[in-house]
Amino acid sequence: MTSAIQMVDITKTFPGVTANDNIDFSVDKAEIHGLLGENGAGKSVLMSILYGLYKPDSGDILVDGEKVDISGPSDAMRLGIGMVHQHFMLVPSLTVVENVILGREPTVNGVTLDMERMLRDVAESCKRYKLDVDIEAPVYQLPVGVQQRVEILKALYRGADVLILDEPTSVLTPGETEELFNAVRELKADGKTVIFISHKLREVLAICDRITVLKRGKVVGTVLAAETGEGQLAEMMVGRKIVYEFTKEAECGLEPVLRLEGLECLSDRGIPALRGLDLDLCGSEILGVAGVEGNGQTELVEAVMGLRELTGGSVKLDGQDITDTQPKTRIQMGVSHIPEDRHKRAIVPDFSVLENLVLGSQRDRFTRNGVSIDFAEAKRFSTDMINDYQIATPGPETLIRYLSGGNQQRVVVAREFSRDPPVVIAAQPTRGLDVGATEYVRRKLVEMRDHGAGVLLISADLDEIWALSDRVAVIYEGSIVAVKAVDETDVQEIGLLMAGGGNE
Ligand SMILES: Nc1ncnc2c1ncn2[C@@H]1O[C@H](COP(=O)(O)OP(=O)(O)OP(=O)(O)O)[C@@H](O)[C@H]1O
Ligand SMILES: [Mg+2]
């Protein structure tokens, strides 16, 4: 059988890095093929080459056995290759249908838009591939998971037979992930080929037929999902076994380090998002916030950080009321924040790695004689951080936009953890990180807890909450419906509470 895609001897270098080093990669027709590897291993670059975003230095690409020249996404689309990026590229003000057909509008007699056909075509794809979307809704109103379905519809509408999904599940809730998988299975049943990038080994094993592992730009190997397991995959990726086992501290100190009382605020759409939320975070504990996404998690974090206006309630840090203080003041008072939206809140893409690492503390920590910035010190600090957090970058002066997704996240985590804060607000801290880096960040969170910090961990990943938390709080429709010590509850009970069942 000819492969749907064959990439032969692909090499791509950037200044200081060989992102792809003589890679051979092939995918069968109607196969779901997983692509795994540590942060910076070269996955996104390889797929960007296939989609025509980068030109390889050398190597060939064959589609259905024929050598092709892909010099841009339009070539890729013509050859039936579509890609859904991690950062969506939809026009927020247009409706779903308008986004899907953008640039490919069907017309009547070559002039007026054939609205009816448009709606019919798109609705049909939704049904056929089990992509549940309100196609007449404007995109800005849709949750991330649904926007992703729109991106998939768009690629299919352009005739994609091969669909590249770059870390599609890192922005999804467990329920949305299940729905995506159902759609992917439909695509396969329909003869389509899917290339699936993820750091979550369990997902890759569940959905893929075969899995290819990359390491430092090279192929480590390709294995059958049915014949491998998490242990082998982790070893192929990082060369050692990964263990997540931490001790728990169920006891809480007397005075909470962070006390939230009766928090109320509105969402971006003007709907009540927090409805009288009470929560105490103690020193020396990791308090996990479990909940189905969209139940106020984002607003909770923003309220604590002073990034969202409250319509009621108060925030106290070490007994001191900080409800009316600026975000900057809170950071100076010792609240560290790993935001869920890295691009919006955490990094400045056109700043260097060094600048991003000292962001926020350049005024106090890196000033000489209280005036000019001490560049030598900043450089020493950033070099240390690059080593400690194993940030793959040609150097501290490289612009952060050129780093892989996971390495950008490492910069954020390194900066926030290095402040040695008494309170850490960690929203999806390991999103986009490979297994090794995930383990490292988790270890750091535990270490900070052991040194007395209170850590509020907001994660869509129940496994993560379970692995780390001393206590679990369940958020539902804008308030905390239960707080439990982990050893006094189980996943079933928490899952039920998350869905609004049961009551305290
Ligand atoms: N435009 C660019 N300029 C310079 N270097 C780049 C560019 N794009 C990627 N790189 C580098 O190429 C290497 C591979 O990056 P790539 O984005 O493919 O990693 P990845 O496997 O997708 O990692 P992650 O899991 O973190 O997303 C990295 O070292 C990255 O910094
Ligand atoms: Mg990537």
Image (cartoon, helix red, strand yellow):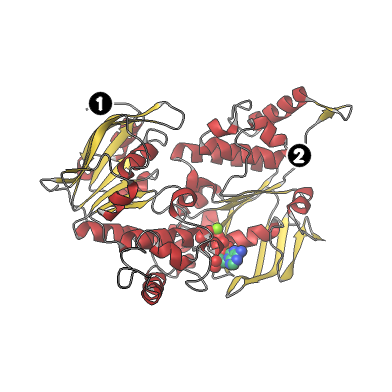
Answer left or right for 389 relative to 79: left
Mark 2 nearby-residue class (10 Å; few <14, some 14–19, many ≥20):
few
Q: Camera-side residue: 242 or 164?
A: 164
Residue at image coords 79%, 59% = 65
**Residue closest to the eye, 159 or 252:** 252
Image coordinates for residue 453, horizontal then vertical, percent: 22, 55
Disc tally is: 2
Per the image, label 2 sits on a secondary structure element best described as loop
Quadrant assignment for the C terminus: top left
**Which numbered disc flags the more N-terminal residue, 2 or 1?**
2
User: Which mark's residue is nearer the viewer, 2 or 1?
Assistant: 2
- Judging depth in this view, the residue of 90 and 173 nearest the camera is 90
Q: Which residue is mark 1?
A: 503
Name the amino acid type tagged 1: Asn
Q: Residue at x 83, y 29 (%)?
A: 107
Name the residue tied to disc 2: 103
Label 2 – label 1 distance at C-alpha: 51 Å
For the question of whether residue 412 can be seen, the reply is yes
User: In the drawing, does residue 186 fall left or right of residue 361?
Assistant: right
| Image-quadrant location for residue 316 | top left
